[in-house]
Every structure is written in C-alpha cells, then in structure tokens.
Image: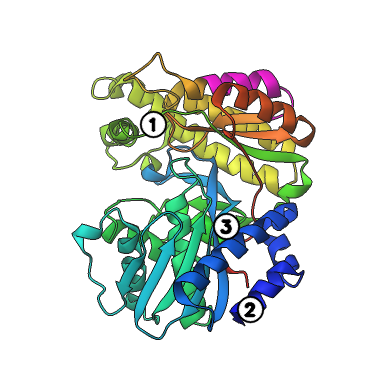
Amino acid sequence: MYSFDAIKKGLLDVEFDSALTFIYGANFAKQKERYLRVLDTFGTLFGTEVEIGFFSAPGRSEICGNHTDHNHGKVLAAAINLDAIAAVAKNNKEIIRLKSEGYDMDLVDVNDLEPKPAEFSKSKGLIRGICASFVKRGYAVGGFDAATANDVLSGSGLSSSASFEVLVGTILNYLYNDGKVTPVEIAQIAQEAENRFFGKPCGLLDQMTCSVGGFVYIDFNNPEEPIIKPIDFAFEACGHALCIVDTGGSHSDLTDEYGAVRKEMVDVAKSLGHEVLRDVDEAQFFNSIDLIRKVASDRAILRAQHFFSENRRVDAQVNALRQQKFGEFKKLVISSGRSSYMYNQNVYSNKNPLSQPVALGLCMSEAILEGKGAWRVHGGGFAGTIQAFVPNEMLTEYKDRMELVFGKGSCYVLSIRPVGGTCVI
C-alpha cells in the first residue's frame, strides 16, 4: 500500500509502468488516465490521508463450449484486457463503502451477513454475499473504502458482474487474508454470492475465468468440484486480435429462449434415463434418435448433438493451443460457431425471425476473414455479440467494415489477459 500522493506521483511518472504493462500490454498509457481518474474520485469521497492500493479483475470471453456448462460439459474461456479496477483503503469501521462510477455508493455492514431479498439483483447484495462466503470458509473480512470503475461491457457476454464479484473478493483477500485465498476459492465464493445474495442461479464459468486469468479449461462433469486447467499459450505472439462485435439487439425478452436450450438438452438426457447430457453415451444417443423423437423435439435432438460435438471441440482446441497450432485452433473456432448456428440454433430469436443482426455479423465476418481468421456467436446468443480472431494486418479493415454496419464503437479490439483478479499496486 502507498500514500495517496505516492500513488498519484507514481502513476504520473514511470514507477508503476511495468505493473500496468504486464496486465494491459501496449495500452497501459491509456490505463494510467483511468487509474488517475479513479484515484481522484477516491480522494474526493474519502480523503487523501490514507494508505491506498489498486486492485483489478478482468472480464472474460467464452472461446468454446457454447451452452454446455449447464449440462455438465466442458468449456474453454479466457480472461480479457477489459477489467474492473478499484482504489482501496482500509477504514477500520467494519463498514464497506464502495462507490462505482455511475452508481450510488454501496454501504455494507460486515457484521450483517444474511441474504436480503431487497438487495437481489443489486451490487450491494453481491458485496454482502462475498463477505458472508469469506466468513463461512473461515477467512477474515473487514471494512474498506473503494472507488471503482468497470469497462467490461454490460450485456455483452463478457461478464461484467463476475469481474465485479472477483474484484471484491480480491480486495478482501489482500487486505485481510494476506493473499492466501486461492483464485479457485474466490471464484466459488463469487458464485455463492450471486446464487444466494443476488438471486441468480449462475454456473461457475464466468467467475472462474475472471479469477484465474489467461486461457482456462474447465470441465463441469462434477459442478461442485470442476476440473480447472490453465492453458499456457502466448496469445500476443500469434499475430491476431480478439474482436467482440456488438451487433445490437436486446436480451430483455430472451429469458425463455435461453432456458429452452438447457431444458431441451435435459429432455433428451431424460429420455435416455439421465439427468444431464454429460451422463449420456454419445453412441447410445445417436442410435436412439428414432426413440427420442417420440418424446423430444427435433430441435432438442439437434441441440444435444451440438453438446456432444462441442465437448470434443473443447478438447481439440486445448490440444491445438498447447501444441502452438493456431491455424488448427481457428478452424475449430469456426466449427464451433457453425454448430451453434445449425444445431444449437441460438443465432437469432424465433420471436422475431426477420431481425438477425448476429447472423448478419457472422455472414460479414466470413466474407472478410474466410481463409485467414475465425468467427462465431459469442455468449448466450440470440442477440448481442459475435467473436472474431482477426489477423493484425486485417484489423483496421475488419473494424471499419463492421462499424459501418453496426455503428461506431461496436467493434471492441481485445487481447487475452495473463492474470485474473490481482493487486496491481
């Protein structure tokens, strides 16, 4: 921890450049401006006569494993260089005072750690829930003051809420537990908070990727104890940028569409005597399609086929990255996207079939990048974002052409971040 003035001087000078470069790469200079803005907000709210640290937690991008985790499948995901940051100081008040840009200040008593229905779907509930899970696991909690900013795009499938949860867990870890809480535990704590205190029955994928960082393989065969393996791959050396394109469209009326994917996969599993598709033998599934059609829809069968092939693709992508075969990796990205389009059928909503911005984005990406890059639907689908791996020499062309159709600023150029939740300064 540093004095307020020392951190400000270090950010204006070069003292913290190496720490910022490790996380943000060549874009670190722009991050300095952001850190200084948050630091000034902290000073205005809480004063400058304190010892301060900076903390960060990234968003994440699903790379493969589209709609598989809820049926205990496999996923490959990656932390990205968009993140939530916080300037933080202990306050010795047993009260957490956290002010996020654009929102009212949250006040949480760390001695009052029961779920409160009035706080469901609110950041205050997440903070209280994370504290409760720390205490439940035998870890310490305490009061702190924080000013935060989050540039993870809300509603984009990049997990802005998970980055916030991991940020709060990382702060408590370093301020009160000497950094001994593992990234896996912080992810589990964040999931518990979202389930019990936020009112959202989410899985563990988002939190785990944001907490661990880098490329992460996760096998949810046992959701209580998922197998988690970081993948050693230097993305910055592959000559490509990771682009997320916001094609527009609202997720507000799509809850039943998302729910149907899970339900229909489960319908197929139950027709074969199991609760989830992961427990079904693929050969048995394929040889029983005539029987399954009597109790489940054709679309459910297609979605089940997507599940089985997507699980295999996750393993194949992991192997390609480990063997430094980025060309093979890109072919598998395209294959994943086509399976989502043809079989999982989450590229447009059946409620409004004439509106297909995601499909249009994929069509344009194929026309621009065929034989050179890769593209797929990103996240839950039906509306929102697509993902593309774009050769660096084509980045300007791709970005300009996508933004011509979907609007200025709709194409976000990202990179894979090597670290998850961390103390930056």
SS of the residue at dot 1?
loop
N-term mark: 2 or 3: 2
Of the two numbered discs 2 and 1 in the rendering, the one whose residue sits closer to the viewer: 2
Which span of residues is magenta-colored?
Answer: 360-373
Between marks 2 and 1, how big is the CA–CA gap? 44 Å
Q: Which residue is disc 2 drawn over?
A: 5
Residue, x 37% and y 23% (percent of image)? 349
Which residue corresponds to mark 3?
229
> Where residue 396 sits in the image (x, y, percent)?
73, 31
Asked whether 346 falls inside the magenta stretch, the response is no
| Mark 1 residue crowding within 10 angstroms, few (<14) / some (14–19) / many (20+) | few
Badge 2 amino acid: Asp
Q: Residues within 10 Å of mark 2 (few under 14, many from 20)?
A: some
Q: Are marks 3 and 1 in contact (CB under 8 Å)?
A: no
Answer left or right for 311 relative to 140.
right
The quadrant in which residue 316 appears is: top right
